[in-house]
Amino acid sequence: MTATDTPPTVLPPATIAPEAEVARDLLRRMVWVAPAFVLAGLIGWGVAGALSALFALALVAANFAAAAALMGWGARTSPTALGIAVLGGYVVRLSVVLGVLWMVQDLSWVEMVPLGITLVATHLGLLLWEAKYVSLSLAFPGLKPGTHTEGSK
């Protein structure tokens, strides 16, 4: 091998966006915890509690998907756009979530306690759970190699 030859690489294909991969993994893990939150909402607050928990889960899924989409756009555009997408996107997404909560708070099927518990617990819990599987390496951005086939441990 000469100095100008490119060494073989073990990098993932350039078509795999690490932010999208992490978001998909978060949503896959959400499927495992969603029934517990819906059941708890049903037991504690009846049908309205279950619907509120489902609504919160949908908000969390939309938030994770929006974050991944914004970061993907920023990463493809420029480092400055990535910074704006991450920091500005957080403020905008948080504002949207709060606006949605404000709009639905008086609807008959909404119970704010199970909705709030589900919203906060799934955001934080899923992010902490996912942190175990995220690679902090430039060689393997996104998930650590082999974690997408490992299941939701």
Image (cartoon, helix red, strand yellow):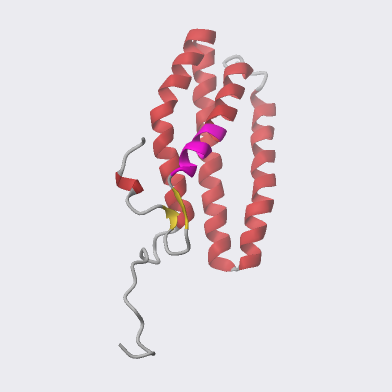
> Residue 67 placed where, x, y %?
56, 48
Q: Quadrant of residue 32?
A: top left
> Residue 48 placed where, x, y %?
53, 13
Q: Residue at x 52, y 58 (%)?
A: 72
Q: Main secondary structure of the magenta part?
A: helix
> Residue 98 placed where, x, y %?
68, 33
Q: Is residue 112 magenta?
A: no
Q: Quadrant of residue 142?
A: bottom left
Q: Is residue 110 visible?
A: no
Q: Is residue 129 magenta?
A: yes
Which part of the image, by quadrant, shows the C terminus? top left
Q: Is residue 58 above or below residue 63?
A: above
Q: Is residue 146 visible?
A: yes
Q: Residue at x 57, y 16 (%)?
A: 109
> Residue 35 placed where, x, y %?
41, 22
Nearer to the camera, 39 or 101: 39
Q: Residue at x 66, y 21 (%)?
A: 105
Q: Residue at x 44, y 58 (%)?
A: 17
Give the magenta range: 124-132
Residue 88 falls left or right of residue 78? right
Nearer to the camera, 91 or 105: 91
Residue 3 falls left or right of residue 88? left
Q: Is residue 120 above or below residue 71?
A: above
